[in-house]
Image (spheres, rainbow, N blue to C red):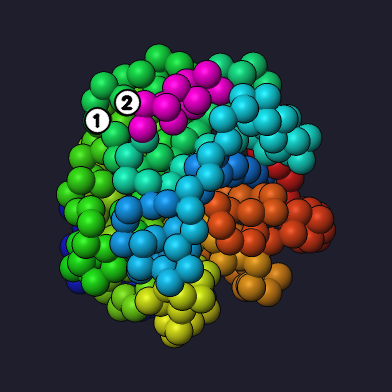
Amino acid sequence: MTTLEEALEIFNQPFLDLLYQAQSIHRKNFDTTKMQLCTLLSIQTGGCPEDCAYCAQSKRNKNHPPMERITDINEIVKSAKEAKEMGASRFCLGASGRRPSNELMGIVCRALPEIKKLGLKACCCMGTLDEEEVVKLKEFGLDYYNHNVDTSPEHYKNIITTRSIDERMETLRLLQKHGIKICTGGILGIGELNEDRINMLLLLKNLDKDPDLITINRLVKIPGTPLENAPDVEPFDLVRFLALARILMPNSYLKLSAGRETMSDELQTLCFFAGVNSIFIGKKLLTVDNSRYTHDLELLQKLGLTKC
């Protein structure tokens, strides 16, 4: 088991040596010319009872939006078809709230087989699940479930009080138990230290097996939320963190998610070199803007990267 001290030693080594180590490991486990493209559709937005300090949908947001829901399966399928046309291999249904209602579960279970018919991998992000819900989603063909732990156990209480990190870990364990692939990770720039970022990775490393995909977000500052004036993540610390994630969990896909729209092409390229091999494409990630699709394609073409 990797200790914090051991991880810090890897993290703090000379920058170019760290990148070389991460890139070498990446090449052993993945085709470095391939980038996984994913798309997210929010089918339930707003009205969330959780108090996550970073989120536009949180009850701590002064501009707390009311709940809106997509109930038309045809609308979901249309979005999935558009995602496939853009080159996505995975299509994720996201929903606000602590856990899915019976109505939401019904919508998702009707949509999953239709998504799978298109040849896409189906993913959901709907909060806490119990074992019965996990089994049901598996039965209807769910491939992946996204459930972030957000930050370290030590910093978590400063960001969220309405749901424990242990509850999040239990959902991840249930998903692994029933053979659903997990996407999990967190957010950088929410007032945490580098030690918190590393402890988050070590928490994920302690699961029964490494996550299938590690999702890393750079905070998108939402006006009206407690973190609207949070300090920016230092770019080299971001790249160091991604390199460490690649080294600690060499077989996991590593996704750079929210926050790419404010990153330069050069910084994104450094992130890719550090081991990132998955990105979201499309206009929106739940409630925040995503990097422009045409620009993403141009950057991937410049770098000689193709979709997988």
For the residues marked 1 and 2, what is the alpha-carbon distance in whole angstroms? 6 Å
Give the image location of residue 43, x and y in percent. 54, 39
Check disc 2 and give the amino acid type: Val
**Residue 145 in the image: above or below residue 197:** above
**Main secondary-structure element of the magenta-colored stretch:** helix
Give the image location of residue 20, x and y in percent. 51, 66
Is residue 106 highlighted in magenta?
Answer: yes
Q: Residue at x 45, y 22 (%)?
A: 106
Check disc 1 and give the amino acid type: Asp
**Residue 90 in the image: above or below residue 67:** above
Q: Which residues are magenta?
A: 101-111
Is residue 52 highlighted in magenta?
Answer: no
Left or right of 134? Residue 17 is: right
Give the residue at mark 2: 134
Between 196 and 1, the one lying in front of the other is 196
Give the image location of residue 148, x and y in percent. 36, 51
Q: Residue at x 32, y 45 (%)?
A: 98
The kind of secondary structure element at disc 1 is loop
Q: Residue at x 27, y 63 (%)?
A: 160
Give the image location of residue 103, x and y in percent. 42, 27
Give the residue at mark 1: 130
User: How many numbered circles are shown?
Assistant: 2
Whether label 1 touches label 2, CB < 8 Å = yes
